[in-house]
Amino acid sequence: MTRRIALAALLLIGACVHHPPSIAGGPGAPTQPNEYWTPSPSVAARLQQTTPATPVALPAAGAKLAVSDVVDLALRNNPTTRLSWAQARAAADLFGASRGAFFPTVTVDVNATHAQPLAPSGVLSRRSQYGPSIGLSYLVLDFGARAGNVDFARQTAIAADLAHNVVVQNTILGVEQALFGYQATRAQRDAERSAVEEATASLNSAEERHRVGLATIADVLQARTFRSQAQLALESLEGAVHVAQGSLAVSMGIPANATFEPPVLIDSLCPDSVRFTSQSVDNLIAVATRQRPDLEAVRAEAAAAAAQVRVAKSGLFPTVSLTASRA
């Protein structure tokens, strides 16, 4: 008896020990918060064999893109826009399904039984019965629960749609920031090229003046140093241009080594920004309140929460339903 109690206690203690389940024979999670997770060999091989999904759209090699092309590629290739779009569609489908509560429910059942009872005479008799039935039920009154559920689904769908708008805006903002960063870096590179040309001209002039005795060797060495510094800065900016173009490609959802020609200049640069700077702060706040979808999404979420409150209050009241059946 004592052994059984000890064994039961040991099993209970073992059940209380937290141990994450294994994944393909390997640990399901790191054993400590300061350790890396090492997958099992089968999982590691499967991860190495998995190829990344190809983007939806790729620019032609060496294609010259306009600003609209850059934004369009970013919106189509960015996985966050596809995710938010799918979530918005799912919320809209749930709203459509919630409206089915206003319609009656029809149920059809078919029961079949087969029995072989033993008669008093000892003879088996077979008996088969089939009983199809149809039922109809309709919720007449529930004191606002049904309407509250539909309103909750509606406001949730609106919030999901507005959240998708936020994702679209953030995607556009990110690709535009990457584009402006690339343009700024390339402009610095072009300016540094001019500086190298000027330093080269200054060096040639110093060497010529030194040849005719109008300058010392120190002047030549100083001009040569200035040109070397300008060339070093130019090489650094050349690398920065490639990095900025790779960042722009990543923001567009295409490989960082994709070959394309980003737009150089943007015509009619931000005319709305110039118009907004002439307005007061109150007007700008009013515009932001009207046009920012994240604020509208919060309002929709608040309305959905209010609908849930109405549904909860309706639980204090009875419901009235009509039911009919025929067998």
Image: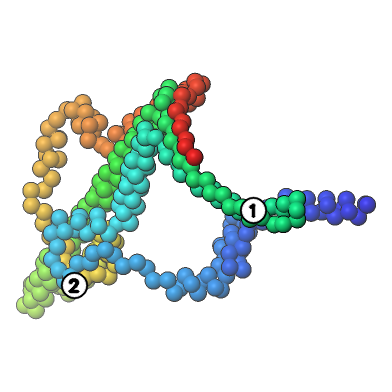
Residue 240 in the image: x percent, y percent? Answer: 26, 64
Q: In this view, does 181 lie to the left or right of 265?
A: right
Mark 2 vs 1: CB contact within 8 A: no
Above or below: residue 14 compared with residue 189: above
Identity of the residue drawn at 70% across and 57% down: 124
Name the residue that disc number 1 marks: 115
Lower sequence index among marks 2 and 1: 2
Say what amino acid the circle numbered 1 marks.
Ala
Residue 43 in the image: x percent, y percent? Answer: 53, 70
Above or below: residue 307 compared with residue 17: above
In terms of depth relative to the viewer, which is nearer, 186 or 317? 317
Looking at the image, the residue that sits furthest to the front is: 121
Name the residue that disc number 2 marks: 61
Above or below: residue 199 compared with residue 176: below
Judged from the image, the secondary structure of the residue bearing numbered disc 1 is strand
Identity of the residue drawn at 49% across and 40% down: 327
Residue 266 in the image: x percent, y percent? Answer: 11, 54
Q: Is residue 12 left or right of residue 114?
A: right
The picture quadrant where one finds residue 141 is top left
The picture quadrant where one finds residue 198 is bottom left
Which disc number belongs to residue 18? none
Q: Tag 2: Cα neighbours inside 10 Å, few (<14), some, or many (≥20)?
A: few
Q: Nearer the viewer, mark 2 or mark 1?
A: 1
Total number of numbered discs in the rendering: 2
Residue 127 visible within the image? yes
The picture quadrant where one finds residue 54 is bottom left
In terms of depth relative to the viewer, which is nearer, 196 or 308? 308
Identity of the residue drawn at 16% across and 59% down: 69
Q: How is the structure coloured here?
A: rainbow
Q: In this view, does 315 lie to the left or right of 295?
A: right
